[in-house]
Image (tube, rainbow, N blue to C red):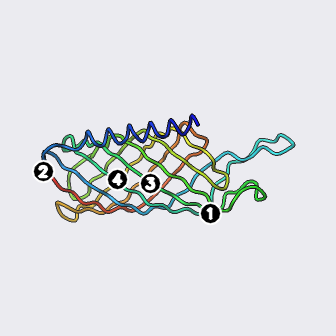
Amino acid sequence: MRDRLGVRSLALGTALVLAGALPARADGDRALSAGLDYATFSAPGITNSSGQTPTASSPSWGAGVSGVYEQALSTDISLRGELAGDTFSGGRTDPKHQTARSYAALGDVGVLFRFDVLRLVPYAFGGVGGVAATGGPLSTTGLVLAVGGGVNFLVDRHRSIGAEVRLASFGTSITLVTVGLRVSTRWGQL
């Protein structure tokens, strides 16, 4: 019950931060991005009856989708809100009691820093949020730190395509890693 209250509080806080980031007039660059990801996780294994230290489990494969909203504070710094969902196959440490498929949902808010504004734009980001995972060896909810980076190729002033890497871990027993492609659209004062 306490974990659910924490996740609800985090969701409410995320919504308030994103709502506060929306300007009353078009006074900054804003962007929406959608991504397709290869995803993997690392979770601790189950200690067997002999008390041996378990090995970590990882899936055979994983895939996910993500959506990102950015609100520029300057040409280099933006506020960032992200929602992502991943599905995994494999990674069971106890086939009798675990399903072959597992799922994870992630939401975070944070800051993005662009290193340059040319046709290729590298960036790094960091944020805090929550994760919920279930199925297979996963059964957790909790706070998460998300860090990552990528590079966008500017098709024109309003559209870009890019690649991104994200690592999310902290207050839970799992670590999520995604590598993906994304497309973005921008509007506002460019």
Task: Check disc 3 and report the residue beneath it.
Answer: 84
SS assignment at label 3: strand
Asked if disc 2 and disc 3 are in contact, CB closer than 8 Å, the reply is no
Q: Secondary structure at mark 1?
A: strand
* Front-most of residues 35 and 104: 104
- Determine the CA span between mark 4 and mark 2: 19 Å
Q: CA distance from mark 2 to mark 1?
A: 43 Å
Q: Position of residue 149 (x, y in %)?
A: 38, 49
Mark with earlier residue (4, 1): 4
Q: Residue at x 15, y 43 (%)?
A: 24
Q: Which residue is mark 4?
A: 68
Looking at the image, residue 86 sits to the left or right of residue 113; the answer is: right
Disc with the residue nearer the chain's start (4 vs 2): 4
Q: Sequence order check: which comes first, mark 2 or mark 1?
A: 1
Which numbered disc covers residue 89?
1
Q: Percent x, y for residue 42? A: 61, 49
Amino acid identity at mark 3: Ala
Question: Who is closer to the viewer here, 155 or 144?
Answer: 144
Snapshot quadrant of residue 119: bottom left
Q: Residues within 10 Å of mark 2 (few under 14, many from 20)?
A: few
